Every structure is written in structure tokens, then in C-alpha cells.
Image (cartoon, coloured by chain):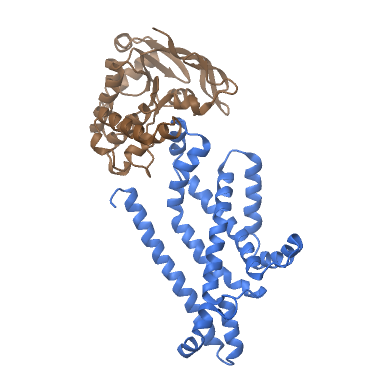
Amino acid sequence: MLELIQQYGVLFLVGSWPNGPLGGFAATLILAFLGMLLSFPIAIVIGIARTGGLRAPRLLATIWVYAFRGIPLVMIIFWAYFVLPRLTGIAVPAFVTALCAIVVYESAFLGEIVRAGLQGLPAGQAEAARSVGLSYGQTMWHVMLPQALANMVPSIVNQFVSTIKATSIVYIIGVQEVTFAAQQVNSMEVGKAFQTFMALACFYFTVCYLISLIAQYLERRMHRRQMGIA
Amino acid sequence: MRTNMIELDGVNKWYGNYHALSDVTGSVTNGEVLVVCGPSGSGKSTLIRTINRLEPIQRGTIRIGGEDIYKQGKDINALRAGIGFVFQQFNLFPHLSVRQNITLSPVKVGGMSRAQADELADSLLAKVGLAHKADAMPANLSGGQQQRVAIARALAQRPPVILFDEPTSALDPEMVGEVLSVMKQLAQDGMTMMVVTHEMGFARDVADWIWFMDEGKIVERARPDQFFTSPEHPRAQKFLSDVLRPHSVSSH
């Protein structure tokens, strides 16, 4: 396995870059990161709509969550692959197609995390905010969301880890990322499938483990700050 | 000038079929301290929460400073910014420092500059005896200190009236005194106050009027000396005999 990594390390890390598009593990991380980043605003809207008093937004957000949470990511990717070009009339790059699918998929899960974060706060927080005259929007922005987001950090990191792993599926529409790179290696090195995919697993595991460590650190720091220690 | 700060007229509230407030009528005059007491479930907390519209009512009118708070098109945020409210559980914002808890409303709702608001916060903290805690986080304060910050937060809105919903019920016994003495000071400064409380000592010393509630109705309203010496309603008599001897445990 070590020789494999020695020989194909660069392919695993960045794909055929700089001679071709950026791929490999770099592309995996960028895809997962952008997916989370872009789905986050949607998730906040969903979370607020799901906890709010307005019927129509609540219904729409609920449908969105149940629809996209109940479909495998690979279906959404296929769907995006065939529908996006028709909808937009242009050839959409595979990377963008995959990103759109991931954003839609993750927004459903993240939206539920935001909802739980908001509903987990004591009712007295919203009441206190309203009783000092803050509007609904100000209450959300200055009182509810900062507390909810802080409580949500562990779940968000969890979701990020799961997103990184979920991106492995996008190789089926030809997005160059680390699983795609592993496939390439596998087709070049006959009889080394086990080692190749073991190396791939190591990449995923290492990064996901590191992210969990960072999350633990952030969680502790946030807790200390709220306790006024740091 | 003696005008009515709070006027309740035939206020009714139901939770489903449960009649929580039944034809509550009464008023609080400018500068007066009204204590509302009664057994749990009598509707006193519900009543005080209707006055800044934390709870909606189904019938009747509530006027603050002569204005109907349920009038169509009433700016509810402006209404609430003009009424102080102190909760049983303090409800400080745990992610904000003590000073930020106090300045949030003056800056965001009142449009005050941050420097002015900080100055206001520091003077109010001095008033409640917590000037040295301005930069502390709420989690580092005792319950009594948190409730005093909550009172300072309510005062920062410069309200003509403050509502207290069982302000000492969640406190350890040794912290009740510090909160009550701040409230007493406010009363002496002429603040109009409506206080739901079980602290009968406070009621006796500070209240101008006492309302005794039972089953969603005001069953007795009296001056404190009269209420404590010769309560008329049998429910009030029983209540007083229970709360004034809280440590007597009858032998069975």
C-alpha cells in the first residue's frame, strides 16, 4: 500500500492537476466544504420556517426536508445531471452538477439541525427578547441564532464529516475527486484493488478524524467562553 | 397627577376549555405598587403576562397609559419596549456579557449610540449594586445577581411601569433579600410596579394595593394592613394562614 501511495500520492491528493482539472482529495474537500457553505443559508431559512408561526413557509420547508431527506443522494445527482442542462440550456460542468445536488441534499439535514438548535433553547429566551422590544427578526438574529449555532457546532461538524464521505458517490458522473482517482489507480494497477481502496479509506478516515478533533476543541472553547473562563 | 397606568376591563382568557382569567377588571395608578398574590394556578402569572402581550386574551381590554394594547395596528415592539418585564427565571441572554444584556434593547430598539448605552448600563448596574460585574457573563453570577441584572435590563428601557412575575421564586433563600431591596428602592423612587409574588413581607411593607386571585378571578382587593389583619374572602384567609406559617408542619 505504501508503494502505491508513493507512486500515486499526487494523483490521490490533487488528481491530474496542474495538467488537468483539480481532482483527488483536494477536490473532495472543496466539494464538501462548498456544499456545506452554500447549504447553510438555505438550512437557516428552513430551520426558521419550520419553527415559525407562518403556515405556508412551514409547509414548504417541511416538504423540502422530507423530500430530500428521503431520497438517496445518488438519485438527486442523477436527477441534477439530466435536468440541470435542460433547465439552464447550457452544458453544466460535472463538478457544478454534483455541488448543486449536494447543496440540496445537505440543506435538508442541516435545516433539521438548525430547527433542533432553535427549539432546544429555553422558551424564556425568546420571551425575554420580545419583552425588551426586539422584533421577531432581531430576536432571531441577536438572541436565538447565536445561541442555537453555538449549540449546533457538534452536529454541524458531524454533518460535515458525513458530507465528505457522501461526496465519494459523485465519481459516477465523472467528477474528479479522490474516489475517482482511486478508480484510475485501480485500472492501472491490476490485482491491487485491496491496497488501492485501503489507501482511499485511509484518506477519508484521517481527515474525518482530524475534523472531529477540531470539533471537540471548538466545543470546549465555546463552553469556556460562555462560562466566562476564557 | 394620579392617572391610571394600567387599566384592565373585563379581561378573559381561555386555554382551550380552561378559563384562565375570568372577567378581570382593575387598575393600577401611576406611582403605585400593586402586589398580586394567590395560590398556584390562580391565574396571576397569566394575568401579568397578558399585560405586555406575552399571552393573548380572548375578550376584554387592557390599556397602558390610556392606550388599548390590542388596538389594530398597535406596534407591539414599541409597546413592549415601553414596559419592563422581570421573569421568574431571569432569562438573561447567556451569550452576552452583563453590560451587553442591558444595552441590547437601548441600541437596537431605542437607537441609542453604543457609548451612551454603555454609560446607561454602567449607571443602572451601580444602582442595583453590580457595577463591578459589567463584563461578567451571566453564568458566573449567582441567581440573585442575575435577577438584579434582569431588573437593570428592564430599567434600561426607561419604562414608566415594570411587571415582575414571581421575581424571587427561583432564588435560594439567602438571595431573596438583595432582590427585594432593589425592588423596594424602585418603589421608593416612584416606579409604577405590578408584582406577582409570594413574599408577604414585601407585600406588607411596599404594596399600595393587594389583589388576591383565585380560579382566574380577583376575589379580594385591599390595602395591605387590611389584607393582613382582616381578610374577607375565606380563600384569602386560608391562603394567609398557610403562607404566614410556612414552616408549621401539622402532625398527622
Residue B227 image point, x, y percent: 33, 11
Residue B242 image point, x, y percent: 31, 22
Tell me, by letter, which chain the rendering colours blue: A
Residue drawn at the location 72% of the way across and 63% of the way down: A84
Residue B181 image point, x, y percent: 25, 24
Between B78 and B183, the residue placed more toward the observer is B78
Report the residue that reaches farthest toward the top: B1
Q: Relative to B94, does residue A163 appear above or below in the rendering?
A: below
* Res. B114 image quadrant: top left
Q: Relative to A33, does residue B209 appear above or below in the rendering?
A: above
Residue A32 image point, x, y percent: 54, 66
* Left or right position of B227 against B79: left
Identify the hue of chain B.
brown
Q: How many marks?
A: 0
Q: Relative to B54, does residue B59 appear above or below in the rendering?
A: above
* Res. B250 image quadrant: top left
Residue drawn at the location 27% of the way across and 29% of the way down: B128
Residue B171 visible, this angle: yes
* Left or right position of A76 against A131: right
Between B251 and B173, the residue placed more toward the observer is B173
* Left or right position of B174 against A39: left
Residue B38 visible, this angle: no
